[in-house]
Image (cartoon, helix red, strand yellow):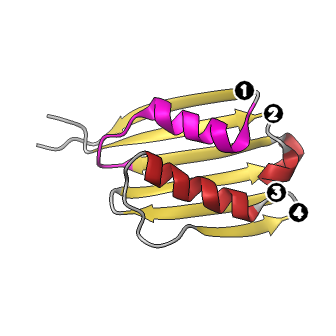
């Protein structure tokens, strides 16, 4: 049996505050993540400012979803990607590094469910 899907999670620290507080940058990151991982975005990413120094975004994928939440006062962000299609976790980390240039990045990938 193979996993039903893969869930990649990231915590990035030491990111530029201006980039974390930029809804357009978050939107572009989510679109680029789907494109570079060859996943199918279903519509444009939805991104909202949640308050001073906090931005959250999500993009619905044909394969599932990707999301990001930023926190300027901690110079960090949290991101995840769940897909029922295989993807390369190291490429997901590379895309995050390209858009937010963290000084520290911690990631993990978990296999979810099982498919016949």
Q: Which mark sits nearer the N-terminus, 3 or 1? A: 3
Cβ atoms at labels 1 and 2 below 8 Å apart: yes
Q: Which mark sits nearer the N-terminus, 3 or 2? A: 2
The answer to whether residue 23 is left or right of residue 65 is right
Q: Residues within 10 Å of mark 4 (few under 14, many from 20)?
A: few
Q: Which mark is residue 104?
A: 1
Residue 42: quarter of image: bottom left
Residue indicated by mark 3: 21
The kind of secondary structure element at disc 4 is: loop
Q: Which mark is residue 48?
A: none
Residue indicated by mark 4: 52
Residue 87 locus on image (x, y percent): 36, 39
Kindly report the distance in space between the C-alpha atoms of the residues bearing marks 3 and 2: 13 Å
Q: Residues within 10 Å of mark 2 (few under 14, many from 20)?
A: some
The region drawn magenta spans 83-102
Cβ atoms at labels 3 and 1 below 8 Å apart: no
The answer to whether residue 41 is left or right of residue 54 is left
């Amino acid at each position: 049996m193979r996993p039903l899907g893969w869930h990649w999670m990231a915590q990035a620290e030491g990111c530029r505050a201006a980039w974390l507080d930029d809804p357009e940058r978050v939107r572009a990151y989510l679109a680029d993540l789907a494109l570079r991982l060859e996943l199918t975005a279903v519509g444009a990413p939805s991104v909202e400012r949640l308050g001073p120094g906090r931005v959250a975004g999500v993009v619905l994928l044909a394969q599932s979803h990707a999301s990001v939440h930023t926190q300027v006062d901690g110079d960090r962000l949290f991101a995840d990607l769940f897909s029922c299609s295989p993807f390369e976790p190291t490429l997901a980390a590379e895309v995050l590094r390209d858009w937010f240039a963290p000084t520290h990045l911690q990631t993990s990938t978990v296999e979810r469910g099982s498919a016949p």
